[in-house]
Image (cartoon, rainbow, N blue to C red):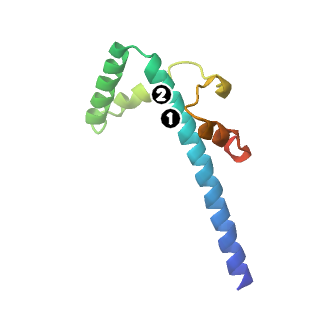
């Protein structure tokens, strides 16, 4: 009985850790997206939206239309300290150790 309980506790902890990590990634992505969205010109946003709609419509016939989602520049390390975070809660959340792993 103890082994079953220990295994269940381990599984719950593992799922909880993964959930917190996913939540952290979603939060960072959302903040980064908002920053990009604010800095982009309205014309660029219109073009991107049209490309996305086209890709959604045509992806079953031609998978290469999904290439619009590929990163077209060299990736570099992102400096999270440059983000303008909306409130203290988010800053505290991002500062916690398990969110930075």
| 89 relative position to 71: left or right | right
Q: Is residue 43 above or below residue 68?
A: above
Q: Which residue is outermost to the front?
A: 88
In percent of width and height, residue 24 lies at 60, 43
Q: Residue furthest bottom?
A: 1
The residue carrying mark 1 is 30
**Residue 15 quadrant:** bottom right
- Secondary structure, mark 2, is helix
Query: Between residues 36 and 59, which one lies in front from this camera angle?
Result: 36
Please determine whether, in this image, residue 2 is positioned above or below residue 50: below
Q: Position of residue 99 (x, y in %)?
A: 67, 44
For the residue pair 32 and 60, the one nearer the viewer reads as 32
Task: Name the element at disc 1.
Answer: helix
Q: Between marks 1 and 2, how big is the CA–CA gap?
A: 6 Å
- The residue sitting at 62% across, 47% down in the picture is 21
Q: Residue 18: image x %, image y %?
A: 62, 53
Asked if residue 66 is positioned above or below residue 89 in the image, the reply reads above
Q: Quadrant of the image for the C terminus?
A: top right
Q: Residues within 10 Å of mark 1 (few under 14, many from 20)?
A: few
Q: Residues within 10 Å of mark 2 (few under 14, many from 20)?
A: few
Q: Is residue 70 visible?
A: yes
Residues under numbered marks 1 and 2 in contact, where contact means CB atoms less than 8 Å apart: yes
Visible residue check, residue 77: no
Q: Which disc number belongs to residue 34?
A: 2
Quadrant showing the N terminus? bottom right
Residue 78 % position (x, y): 64, 25
* Nearer to the camera, 62 or 26: 26
85 up-or-down from 13: above or below: above
């Amino acid at each position: 009985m103890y082994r079953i309980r220990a295994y269940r506790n381990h599984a719950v902890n593992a799922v909880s850790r993964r959930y917190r990590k996913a939540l952290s990634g979603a939060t960072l992505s959302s903040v980064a997206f908002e920053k990009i969205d604010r800095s982009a010109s309205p014309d660029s946003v219109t073009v991107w939206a049209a490309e996305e709609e086209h890709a959604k419509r045509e992806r079953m016939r031609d998978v290469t239309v999904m290439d619009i989602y590929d990163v077209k520049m060299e990736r570099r390390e992102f400096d999270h300290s440059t983000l303008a975070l909306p409130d203290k809660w988010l800053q505290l959340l991002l500062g916690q150790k398990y969110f930075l792993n």
